Image: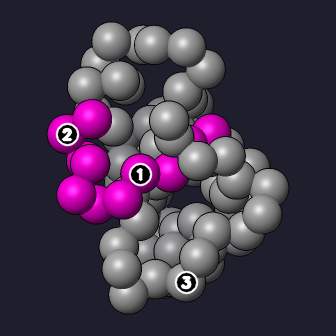
Amino acid sequence: MYGSPAASAAAATLAAAQSARWDRRRRADLAWRLARELPLRILVTHEFPFERAADAYARLDARQGDLVHAVLRYRATPAAPPDTREAP
């Protein structure tokens, strides 16, 4: 398996035969494109105003209740969709 794409991926490099097609720029572009397609919004369980960031981090650290993923809301961002719960 030495030199195969799978072995190379584990080492965060590409085999020499594929490095011309998959240069660092192309890999980064693909990673960013795929990251934007991930439905991360469904993981949000709570939103906090930025001013309460310390509360959000404390609750995450304490693993309290059903908080899985907290979003920090800044004033310049639009309101959250109606399916998102507000933190108490």
Q: Earlier in the sequence, mark 2 or mark 1?
A: 1
Disc 3 is placed on an element classified as loop
Q: Is 81 situated above or below 53?
A: below
Assess disc 1: are there few (<14), some (14-19) or many (≥20) residues with their C-alpha within 10 Å of its C-alpha. Answer: some
Give the x, y percent position of residue 27: 48, 73
Q: Which residue is mark 3?
A: 78
The one of 75 and 36 positioned closer to us in this rendering: 75
- For residue 48, the mark is 1
* Alpha carbon separation for disc pair 2 and 1: 10 Å
Give the x, y percent position of residue 53: 25, 47
Find the magenta span and give its range: 45-55
The amino acid type found where label 3 is placed reads: Pro
Quadrant position of the N terminus in the picture: top right
Give the x, y percent position of residue 55: 27, 35
Disc 1 is placed on an element classified as strand
Whether residue 22 can be seen here: no
Assess disc 2: are there few (<14), some (14-19) or many (≥20) residues with their C-alpha within 10 Å of its C-alpha. Answer: few
